[in-house]
Image (cartoon, grey):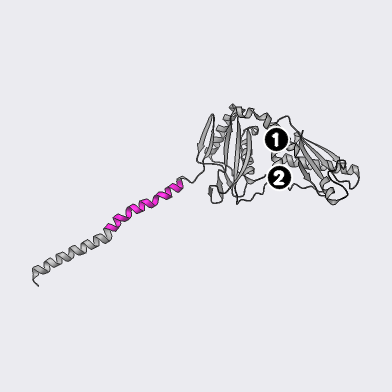
Amino acid sequence: MSKKALYLLGIALTIILGTFLYVKFCCNCSMEAPAADTEKVPTVAVKDNNFVPFILNGSGINFRTNDNLKFLKNSAALIVPVGDSVAIGIENLKAFLISNPKQKVTITGYATSDETNTTKFENLGLARANDVKNYFVSKGLSGAQFDTKGEIIDKWKTNLDTLLGPADYKFETADTTAVGSDEWSILKEKINADPLILHFNTNKSSDNLSAVEKQKVADIAKYMEHVKDASVLIVGHTDDVGNRDANVVLGQKRAAFSKDYLAKNGIDASRITTESKGPDEPAGENTTAEGKANNRRTVITIK
């Protein structure tokens, strides 16, 4: 083969090798760059949405911040201190409610279905709503301007074991609040038609209430909060075992125990009256164990 042919062959091989190396390395680099940019998008989106905003939105108030109140899983205790922006929102709410004394706010607290309720409230959501209310009151807001509700839901936004802002706030106009007399009359009738009755073992007291009984306590507290001239009457009763005078004293002790329980659950003790009927008004026959158990009780109504 001539030198000229070898020279041309070398040039051809150089071009082929150069083309191969360009396609293998340079082209792949230029193709991978857009893919890397694309992968960043969902990461940024998740970070931007990793909050539940604290919103106060009613006629005359509109506040929003991406920070919020927080609760640990299975806990009804608000995590304090709260963030600075939330604290500003609470101060705005305080000023708004002072300027609008007839304004009402319903706090709805939430809990997930897999959480455990160890409180004396009907559900953990209601317990959280009441803790938020108590925190607001500690900051100078009027407790009389708040109602509380609780709901159980399947899921809520969390950060590890912390629930982010499991509460919302509904503002009611003054006109809506003014229509309240019928509502409270209906609630009083409901309470007294099926009163809260706490039963006691012989010479023993217990505050281990059922869910139904806890709801009745919540209803009484709600009524007392809104009807300022109302009072609670607690009547203690006993079975007929032993001396009558001693049983009257025992009935009074049971009434006092029930009063203390209600006071710990938000009802002003000065608005609770107690008395004892001893064995004089039995609910069941004292000749049977079941009847005696029914007679060892306190009956709680609205006066």
Tell me: residue 107, above or below residue 3. above
* Circle 2 residue: 212
The alpha-carbon separation of the residues under discs 2 and 1 comes to 15 Å
Q: Secondary structure at mark 2?
A: helix
Question: Residue at position x 71%, y 41% from top?
Answer: 216
Residue 45 at x, y = what percent? 43, 47
Which is nearer the N-term, disc 2 or disc 1?
1
- Give the residues in magenta: 27-47
**Amino acid type indicated by mark 2:** Val
Confirm whether the magenta stretch covers residue 33.
yes
Q: Tag 1: residue type?
A: Leu
Q: Label 1: state its secondary structure.
A: helix
Which residue is situated farthest in the right direction here?
A: 243
Quadrant containing the C terminus in the rendered view: top right
Magenta region's main secondary structure? helix
Q: Where's residue 34, x and y in %? A: 33, 52
Nearer to me, 184 or 29: 184
- The N terminus lies in quadrant: bottom left
Q: Is residue 278 left or right of residue 73?
A: right
Q: Which mark is residue 187?
A: 1
